[in-house]
Image (cartoon, rainbow, N blue to C red):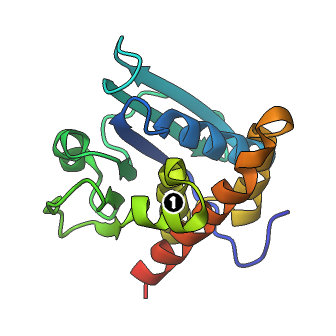
């Protein structure tokens, strides 16, 4: 499945937002895609006691060798779905890292000139893809597009596996949302 153009580097990404925004699911899909691709992976979720609206974040570590600890103080990547998450985690991203910002809900800049910042109108792109609930996959796509952390085909396959069976109706819009985000991420590097 690996292509000659794909760049697989060891990395870690923190995805953060409100509960119900799909950050944990997006992290699970990225972890699954990376694992299926033969990488070592850890997926460490953290969330508040609220059903929806509380905090939710996940750290996904992807490596070519066994991972010593899933706890990361300064990740190389950050996907933020809301302003409180950006304010809390953007200062912790390593210099040279990638910060993907949900422009649909965040009207501020993370003020990180030492990082690549990708602003994504996730809600609008998800709606165009067929499901406003797929904003998490738009954001994941933007991160993958900006980093080449895993081949797009691997993520699309993980999305299809996640929604197999009685949730199959979500596959097309989720993949379309992921692809829309990929384009934004790729454009950010030009």
Crowding around mark 1 (Cα neighbors within 10 Å: few <14, some 14 to 19, many 20+) is many
In this rendering, position of residue 16 left or right of residue 128: left
Residue 38 visible in the current orientation: no
Disc 1 on helix, strand or loop?
Answer: helix
Between 111 and 21, the one nearer to me in the picture: 21
Query: Is residue 180 visible from the viewing direction of this image?
Result: yes
State which quadrant residue 89 falls in: top left
Q: Nearer the viewer, residue 89 or 17?
A: 17
Please identify the quarter of the rendering in which residue 75 is found: top left
Looking at this view, name the residue that lies furthest to the top.
49
**Residue marked by disc 1:** 138
Q: Residue at x 36, y 11 (%)?
A: 49
Residue 90: where, in percent of width, then height? Answer: 23, 49
Q: Where is residue 55 shown, x and y percent of the image? A: 31, 27
How many numbered discs, if any? 1
In the image: residue 112, left or right of residue 189: left
């Amino acid at each position: 499945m690996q292509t000659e153009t794909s760049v697989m580097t060891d990395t870690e990404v923190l995805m953060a937002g409100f509960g119900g925004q799909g950050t944990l699911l997006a992290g699970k899909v990225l972890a699954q895609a990376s694992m299926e691709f033969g990488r070592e992976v850890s997926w460490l979720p953290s969330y508040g006691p609220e059903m929806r609206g509380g905090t939710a974040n996940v750290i996904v570590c992807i490596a070519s060798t066994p991972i010593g600890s899933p706890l990361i103080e300064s990740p190389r990547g950050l996907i933020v779905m809301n302003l409180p998450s950006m304010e809390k985690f953007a200062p912790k991203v390593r210099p040279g890292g990638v910060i993907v910002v949900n422009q649909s809900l965040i009207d501020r800049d993370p003020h990180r000139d030492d990082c690549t910042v990708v602003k994504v109108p996730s809600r609008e792109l998800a709606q165009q893809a067929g499901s406003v609930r797929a904003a998490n996959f738009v954001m994941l796509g933007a991160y993958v597009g900006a980093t080449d952390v895993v081949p797009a085909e691997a993520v699309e396959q993980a999305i299809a596996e996640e929604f197999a069976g009685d949730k199959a109706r979500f596959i097309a819009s989720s993949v379309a949302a992921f692809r829309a985000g990929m384009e934004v991420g790729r454009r950010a590097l030009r």
